[in-house]
Image (cartoon, grey):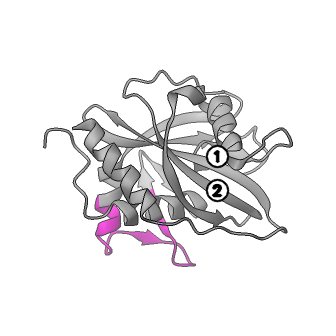
Amino acid sequence: MEMNFIIRLSRLLGMNPKKNILDPALIPAAVFLIVYLKDDHYCILLNKRTDLVENHKGEISFPGGRKDENDTTLLDTALRELWEEMGIISEDVEILGELDDVRTNSNYAVSVFVGTIGSSYNFQPNSNEVAEVLEVPIKVLSDVYQDVSECVRDTLGSPMYTYGGHLIHGATAKIIARFLDIIAGTEWGIKNE
């Protein structure tokens, strides 16, 4: 059952061509939306940023960051950041596709890569960058997103989510909403249900 959802997800991503943001005034950056099975639920990996990072202190985000001069591509950036923040080795990531680029309020153009890892991965978060690891079941986010009456939105109409006492907003919430739009109508979420 695990691979059926992952295969469908890869196909769905392939049927949704990525929309790029090509604005040289924005700083290029990349994140990874990692999907994996944990305790019979498909989850996405988020983290709470520490107060030691330069931008977005204490916010909930996907592993990622700005492109360095040594990064050849934005995929290199996303994989490097995944290693630096969460200790996930690039060889352990199966890349499934991409989502649309997202513009942030802090002048970044963020490329979003989607991938999967094994269900029992041993994360090794960098304590200088990651205050807390959040393994959020997709079903929890999807249930809120599908119930428009309960889906809280910010003043610009962007979705916001709560999980474990944390507020997920901004670019991270926009990425989650786009991901949920793509997987809407597919069977997924809880193994053996």
Is residue 149 visible to the viewer in this orientation of the structure?
yes
SS at mark 1?
loop
Mark 2 surroundings: few (<14), some (14-19) or many (≥20) residues within 10 A: many
Left or right placement of residue 28 versus residue 193 in this view: right
User: What residue did someone put label 2 on?
Assistant: 111
| Residue 145 part of the magenta segment | yes
Image coords of residue 2 (percent x, y): 27, 37
Distance from the alpha carbon under mark 1 to that under mark 2? 21 Å
| Residue in the picture at 38% in, 66% down | 181
- Residue type at numbered disc 2: Ser
Q: Looking at the figure, which quarter contains the C terminus?
A: top left
Query: Observer-nearest residue: 178 or 94?
Result: 94
184 w.r.t. 55: above or below: below
Q: Looking at the figure, which quarter contains the N terminus?
A: top left
Is residue 88 visible to the viewer in this orientation of the structure?
no
| Residue in the picture at 33% in, 74% down | 148
- Residue type at numbered disc 1: Gly
24 w.r.t. 64: above or below: below
Q: Which mark is residue 58?
A: 1
